[in-house]
Amino acid sequence: MATRTSQRVPRDGIPIATKAVNRAMAKNSLSGDTHNPFTVLNSTPDAILHEVLMDLELKSENIDEHIDSFKTEEIARAAIVEANYKCFLEKQLEKTYPRDDEQIQDLAMEAISNQMRNVSPSPKGGFRR
């Protein structure tokens, strides 16, 4: 049996769906990438934050110490938010894909008769419940 395949794409024997899942997991993992998308202050240079604090006319003896404490608190809060977000994504994944045979059976694409819907034909035409 002959099948057509693209000669531009090298065949490695890994199904596309598996590749997509692996790519999504790699994108969501923290390994290798220390940047947290839930942080703002940590991606802003201290000089800019110093200017903002000066523009707000905040009185402080050591502004750099305050900036460091703000950034530290942000990292802690961002880690919590990121963990909650990953938990949310896992719950969404559980809702999306069937996990066992019973859930797969629930998705069976079988014809549904009017008897299964508790609908019977009326004598005048049409259907009644």
Image: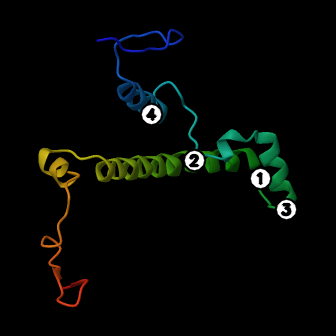
Q: Which residue is mark 3?
A: 57
Tell me the tag on residue 61.
Answer: 1
10 Å crowding of disc 1: few (<14), some (14-19), many (20+): few
Which SS class for mark 3?
Answer: loop
Between 114 and 74, which is closer to the camera in this rendering?
114
Select label 2 or label 1 by which is in front.
Answer: 2
- Please say if the residues under marks 1 and 4 sit with CB atoms less than 8 Å apart: no
Mark 3 is on which residue type? Glu
Lateral position of residue 9 relative to residue 120, left or right: right
N-term mark: 3 or 2: 2
Select label 1 or label 4 by which is in front.
Answer: 4
N-term mark: 2 or 1: 2
User: In this figure, which colouring scheme has been used for the structure?
Assistant: rainbow
User: Does 67 appear above or below 126?
Assistant: above
Q: CA distance from mark 2 to mark 4?
A: 19 Å
Where, quadrant-wise, is the N terminus in this rendering?
top left
Q: Which residue is mark 2?
A: 38
How far across and down, in percent of the image, does residue 101 sit? 13, 45
Q: Residue at x 61, y 46 (%)?
A: 39
Q: CA distance from mark 2 to mark 1?
A: 29 Å
Mark 4 is on which residue type? Ala
